[in-house]
Image: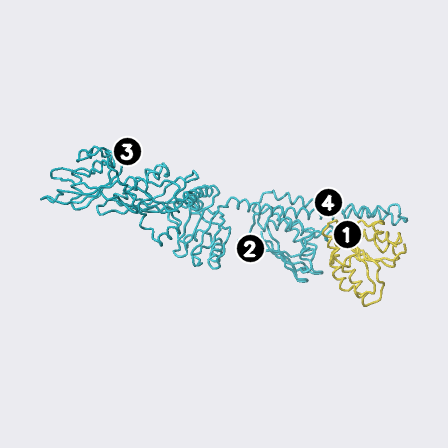
Amino acid sequence: MKPVETICVIDDDNIYGFWVKKLLVSKNFCKSLSIFENGLAGFNYFNELVVGEGVIPDLILLDINMPVMDGWEFLEEFSKIKNKFEKEIPIYVVSSSINPADIERAKGFEEVSGFITKPLTFDNLKQIKLFQD
Amino acid sequence: MRAIREPWNREGYYDIPNFWAWDLTSNTFSISDNVNAILSLPSQTINNLDTLKSRLFSIDTKWLDFNIVKELTKNENYFEQKIRLYNAEGNFQFFQINGYVELRDALNYAALVKGTFTHISYLVEHPEKLPQPPVHKTEFELIIKGIEAGIWDWDLQYDTLWWSSKFYELLGYQDGEVNTSFNAFFNSLLHQDDRRKVEKLLEEHLYQRKPYKTEIRLLCRSGEYKWFQTSGQALWNSEGKPIKMAGSIIDITETVNHRSALLKNEFLLNESAKLARIGAWEVDLITQEVYWSESTKAIYEYPSNLKTPSLPEALLYYPEASRDIFSKAFNESIALGKSFDISCEFLTYAQNKIWVRVIGSPLFDIQGTIIGVRGVIKNIDEEKQKELFLQDSLKIIHEQNRKLVNFAHIVSHNLRSHTGNLEMVSNFIEECDTEYEQRLLLDNVKQISKQLSETIAQLNEVLVTQSQVQQPKVRICFDDILTKVKSMIQSELVLSGAHIKSNFTRCESVYYIPAYLESILINLLSNAIQFRKPAMCPEITLSSWIENNKIILQIEDNGMGIDLEKYKYKLFGMHHTFHKHTSGKGFGLFLIKNQLDLMGSKIEVESQENIGTTFKITF
């Protein structure tokens, strides 16, 4: 498996943030990682990418429940700008929720490629299509 | 013995009459000797009044009575009688006696009567030899054939009875198949239980001229009785003696069966209506009159001896809201010819409110104009009360269920977010190379366990809140509880430099569970302080009043405000607040929403970013 260039993690949980970075880098899933503490911070980054220079992430791991702007709002905002990127960025929703309503709702977004229930592990990262070749 | 000339061998009528003469003054009587020949008696056996009388059938004796003849001829010169005389074998023979007064005495009584006698036994026994009833003209024949009635014609003089072919048909016979004498009719065909009635009615008609019309049972060829309606009219001669009677019979078996079925159905209907608490009603649009059946009155607790109210009066028995429902359905029914089926409340005569189902259909006259509305009502109060209770229960159950599911998701989510972290961290225990990482890992584990405890404590608080709903409600003064809450959050107040103003003069107290009101005030005040505008002292104003009979408490601040368009649906939720890791702040609104919900109170919020937030509680 060849590591991807950059993965973007949007999650307000700093404990999760620290260890997910270790997991992704040490297990060689990616070369670099950017973490945003809520949907708005994540969206701002992408919004700047539209006009400015920067690395377009290969994958987004998105939490749902966050203050300021939650995962759902991020998805709505992101869908408005996604066509401005030269490549398609797969988004995986990573949440503690096991509520079927949340899973259904996530599937309703065409930007969402999958739903992963926390904790994020090596095994369920391998489920991501990007890492399957 | 002289040969007797057959009197009936001539086409037509009677034989040439034989003669008799009676001198009433001397009471001498003479008669042609031929009478002895007819009776196969030796010549001169009957030759005077006495010898004639000795041969006379006893019932007929009166017809040769001196006084009767005198009476008969008082105003009339002619008379006729039928008599029976015994022949040699002891069988009687019918004779027709015709007489006329030839002489009268000084007192104008008959003094000498003379006449003829004719042997008519053959004709009595063979009535077909008699001339047919005179009604049988072509038109009448057609009518007789055409109508669904059997026609009968009864000659009282000759005691013969004629039936039209329809009569035979009605009884299931071929034309002329049975003996149609009156005797046969009376003794064989007429139902035993109807005989006395017919006899009485015939007598009343023939001698008192009362109308003859009745219902009788006649035996049919099949052996069963059928119901007929019969009526007839007699013809009287100048002496007032009935000589003829004719009439008709109509098969009314079906009608009688219908009638008895109807009676049976009516009985069943009444009884079932009583049992099912169903009543009938009808409104006559022309007279505006209302009809209520007995069971309707029973449902409406309306005295059965009281006159049914008119339409406008009846409408007043519907409570206002129901009256509109009923009037709308009723008017539509009249206007569009539609049926209706509604459920509404009714105020009974005894002032009890009951639920009734009213079904109605328009009534049309022969031209298709709506002239009334008819229908049934059913007392559905018991069912409706059950239904309403069930609806309420269902609502409560749905709401409880929704809350439970919601709570289960919250519990699951909030616990899972910590256990998920714990699992993730523990996966790295073996892989932590540096001392820094190992220390961080242990720190994280501690942090996670602390968060987990907090979460569990909060969830417990929700459960405690649920159980507190059992606590008694007491009268709480807003001033008192505010003072208490202020002391509980004193350090926050001092640190933020908050100003709290209050005005509870319009409504000083509320009847509530103290723990809830305390929690509500603590959380709302804490929020106002926590989400103050940076570098600005929070100003919090509390006020209370009464609106639409409900107590209102309002808490207004000058804080950061909330973007309600974005967060309206999340404001009282629990989800994202936990993730901020600001030790459960924001959990408060979720908690107090729960408490208010449990009490059936309402909380509304108005906010403008950078201006402030106002919470309005309706108790």
Residue B91 image label: 3
Residue at position x 88%, y 50% in the image: B436
From the viewer's perspective, is residue B27 above or below residue A107?
above
Q: Amino acid at mark 3?
A: Asn
Find chain B in the image and tell me its colour. Answer: cyan
| Labels 2, 4: one chain | yes
| Chain for disc number 4 | B
In the picture of the structure, the residue carrying the numbered disc 4 is: B456
Circles 3, 2 touching at the beta carbon (< 8 Å): no
| Labels 1, 3: one chain | no
Label 1, label 3: how many angstroms apart (C-alpha)? 128 Å
Camera-nearest label, 4 or 3: 3
Kindly indicate the quadrant of the structure image that contains residue B32. Answer: top left
| Chain for disc number 2 | B
Circles 4, 3 touching at the beta carbon (< 8 Å): no
Camera-nearest label, 2 or 1: 1
Sequence-wise first label, 2 or 4: 4
Q: Amino acid at mark 1?
A: Ser
Q: Nearer the viewer, residue B164 or B266?
A: B164
In the picture of the structure, the residue carrying the numbered disc 2 is: B545
Q: Residue furthest top?
A: B89
| Labels 2, 1: one chain | no
Camera-nearest label, 4 or 1: 1
